[in-house]
Image (spheres, rainbow, N blue to C red):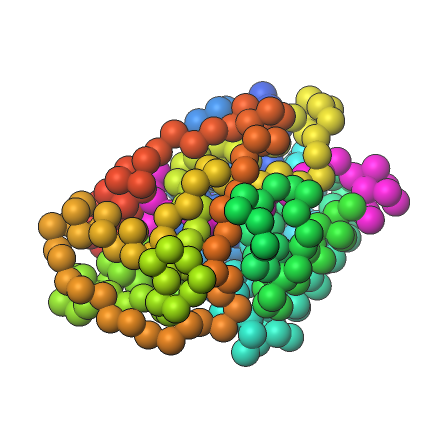
């Protein structure tokens, strides 16, 4: 297949045995892992990304690439038609919960209006399946030890709210048109599934810690006064390669017409505190610098740990990486760059 440029949408000539799925945000950290997971299973893929936070080099040379915003309905529709797309995995969006508090309008434009435009493009081209990248942020700060899909959604940031609205949009469009859909609520995504891929977010824990160590600085903990055992935030960390496999399983189920729940948590059922992650980083890297304590970040809940039982039941999904695997794979990829 010939990769595309932002001004040229070229049709594919050889249909993939499982159909072709468009991955929005496929040049990003998570999206690029999803593209590789699909390709490994023989799926045809097309990537749409505006490169606002993604990286062109994260997309394999043989995968068609369209540089476009999901707000550009005509461009998305053109790509869907040109590549005879049968389904969409929608990861594109503004992903920073803390920053969304300062930039609510931008967050809603990218995550809500962008999803509306994508659904419009899908409807106009007859593409009837979508897997949506949602987030644990829809739960806010839950008052239960383990979050399930039935836990009330009380988002505390525009980002979390925008993801919940995205889920509502899919459900409403399904009632109107029969759209086949499911949403995957991510918890903290870490690690690397390939040495060339790494998390470049300026706000996520792993890149912030690694950058500090590489630059000879002490890493930073944002808040140590949360109501948790050691005062630091507790999160459910999920390896990005395991997460990518869940997307393939969801796409396969939708393609086969299998009934799915509207939402699935992708969590391990166990939590690690930020301080515990810092200790694992020190053990893996051999660099032991005492972290400095900074104020809390706006919009950060104290604890989110989830059950992945429904995803295990319906998608055959499970965690296959330990915390040490997560840190070591991420450190190896980041240190190469």
Judge left or right: residue 94 versus residue 179.
left
The magenta segment is 172-201
Where in the figure is residue 29, as x and y percent of width and height? 42, 50
User: In the depicted view, which residue is nearer to us: 195 or 66?
Assistant: 195
Judge left or right: residue 138 versus residue 242.
right
128 versus 287 height, above or below: above
335 versus 174 height, above or below: below
268 versus 155 height, above or below: above
User: In the depicted view, which residue is nearer to us: 49 or 214?
Assistant: 214
Q: Residue furthest bottom?
A: 102
Which image quarter is the C terminus in?
bottom left
User: In the depicted view, which residue is nearer to us: 51 or 172?
Assistant: 172
User: In the depicted view, which residue is nearer to us: 240 or 109?
Assistant: 240
247 versus 57 height, above or below: above
Residue 232 at least partly seen: yes
Where in the figure is residue 322, as x and y percent of width and height? 32, 35
Judge left or right: residue 178 versus residue 207.
right
Where in the figure is residue 186, as x and y percent of width and height? 53, 47
Where in the figure is residue 178, as x and y percent of width and height? 83, 37
Q: What residue is drawn where x is 18% and y is 52%? A: 282
Q: What residue is drawn where x is 12% and y is 55%? A: 287
Q: What residue is drawn where x is 61% and y is 74%? A: 104
Q: Total label count? A: 0
The image quadrant of residue 312 is top right
């Amino acid at each position: 297949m010939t990769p595309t440029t932002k001004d040229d949408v070229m049709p594919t000539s050889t249909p993939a045995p499982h159909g072709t799925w468009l991955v929005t945000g496929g040049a990003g950290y998570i999206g690029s892992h999803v593209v590789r997971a699909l390709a490994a299973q023989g799926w045809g893929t097309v990537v749409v990304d505006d490169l606002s936070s993604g990286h062109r080099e994260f997309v394999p040379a043989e995968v068609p690439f369209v540089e476009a915003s999901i707000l550009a309905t005509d461009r998305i529709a053109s790509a869907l038609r040109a590549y005879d797309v049968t389904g969409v995995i929608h990861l594109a969006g503004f992903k920073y919960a803390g920053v969304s508090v300062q930039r609510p309008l931008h967050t809603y434009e990218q995550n809500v209006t962008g999803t509306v435009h994508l659904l419009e493009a899908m409807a106009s081209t007859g593409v009837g399946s979508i897997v949506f990248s949602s987030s644990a942020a829809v739960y806010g700060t839950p008052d239960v030890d383990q979050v399930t899909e039935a836990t009330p959604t009380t988002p505390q940031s525009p980002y979390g709210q925008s993801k919940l609205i995205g889920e509502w949009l899919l459900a409403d469009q399904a009632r109107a048109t029969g759209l086949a859909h499911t949403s995957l609520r991510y918890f903290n995504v870490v690690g690397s599934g390939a040495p060339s891929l790494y998390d470049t977010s300026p706000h996520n824990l792993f890149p912030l810690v690694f950058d500090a160590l590489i630059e000879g600085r002490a890493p930073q903990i944002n808040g140590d006064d949360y109501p948790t055992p050691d005062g630091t935030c507790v999160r459910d960390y999920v390896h990005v390669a395991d997460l990518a496999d869940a997307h393939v399983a969801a796409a396969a189920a939708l393609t086969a017409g299998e009934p799915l729940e509207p939402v699935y948590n992708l969590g391990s059922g166990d939590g690690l505190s930020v301080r515990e992650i810092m200790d694992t980083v020190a053990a893996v890297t051999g660099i032991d610098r005492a972290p400095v304590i900074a104020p809390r970040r706006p919009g950060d809940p104290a604890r989110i740990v989830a059950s992945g039982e429904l995803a295990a039941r319906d998608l055959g999904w499970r965690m296959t990486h330990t915390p040490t695997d997560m840190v070591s794979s991420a450190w190896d990829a980041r240190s190469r760059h």
